[in-house]
Amino acid sequence: MPLPPSLVAVPPRGDLTPVREITLDGKGITLSGLLAEPAAPPRALLLALHGGGMRAGYFHGRADPATSLLTLAASCGYTALALDRPGYGRSAAQLPHGMSMLEQADQLREAVRAYGPAHPNGAGVFLVGHSLGGRVALHMASGWTDSGLLGVDVSGIGDRWAVAARQLNGQQRRSSHRMHWGPLALYPPGTFRLAESLIAPLPEREAREIPDWPRVYPEVARDVRVPVRFTFAEHEQWWRSDPHTVRAMLNRLGSPLSRSERLADAGHNISLGRTARSYHLRMLAFLEECLTLTETP
């Protein structure tokens, strides 16, 4: 998606944990992404899925190293893998029109299975999704038949739109910048200059499904059998997040544990903002809780 005018740029500082590029095979489709690994055997695999019009680097913000989910998760003992969803990155040439959300979920499950045998995953897989990536994460969880799925943590997504249909059809317009980002002061200096490399065209098939989520969500939610956490930014403008709407949304889940949180001083793109570290720490605390549940008889 197009970016708003840049804030004052500052050079990024070095990371404490190396993040490297990686490619995986998902049913013959080459998926690109970023990987950060802990020094010791991982406690779990965190798989992060970006939103529409973004790429995997969304979870490795360069304006301030504190915003990187990948390095933080690795420092806490987890393998952190952020993938370019099908239709983005290396797979864009193979999938010029993208894939449906359900097809993406199938592809990504296969990619995780292909990654697993040669790489220890610890106690299992924890899914993280932002915006459209959150939809894919929930689709993945609803169709997950193997053991080892620990939980799902999503942000930038609800189940009731807070905007009119005409705004959904114009998400790429300049007028939608504030909807995606919120107040520019919520982001570290240099965010928008450095984020240029994260921006990618929204695939056609993915874009067509955007308005349908309120209809699809109940069918997906009832088949999700693992803990789920939703986070809503204070300045989220795409989705309704009033208590009644959120409570009804959680009640549609088949999960043994579900909860929601509201993050102050954050816009839709939480993981690139000044409060990213606070959000990511809460996410990892939820992962710790999911690990405890798997260990409890």
Image (cartoon, rainbow, N blue to C red):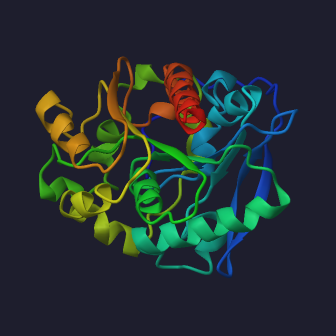
Instruction: Name which quarter of the figure residue 33 lies in.
Output: bottom right
In the displayed structure image, the side of residue 291 where residue 74 appears, left or right: right
Q: Position of residue 31 (x, y in %)?
A: 67, 67
Q: In which quadrant will I find the C terminus? A: top right
Observer-nearest of 188 and 280: 280
Q: Position of residue 239 (x, y in %)?
A: 23, 42
Q: Position of residue 142 (x, y in %)?
A: 40, 61
Q: Is residue 61 visible?
A: no
Q: Residue at x 19, y 53 (%)?
A: 167
Q: Residue at x 62, y 37 (%)?
A: 194
Q: Residue at x 45, y 45 (%)?
A: 130
Q: Residue at x 78, y 39 (%)?
A: 42
In the displayed structure, 18 sits above or below 203; it is: above
Instruction: Name which quarter of the figure residue 231 lies in.
Output: top left
Q: Residue furthest right?
A: 39
Q: Residue furthest front?
A: 297
In the displayed structure, 56 sits above or below 246; it is: below
Q: Is residue 293 visible?
A: yes
In the displayed structure image, the side of residue 128 where residue 255 appears, left or right: left
In the displayed structure, 40 sits above or below 51; it is: above
How many numbered tags mark residues here? Answer: 0
Q: Position of residue 162 (x, y in %)?
A: 16, 43
In the displayed structure, 136 sits above or below 178; it is: below
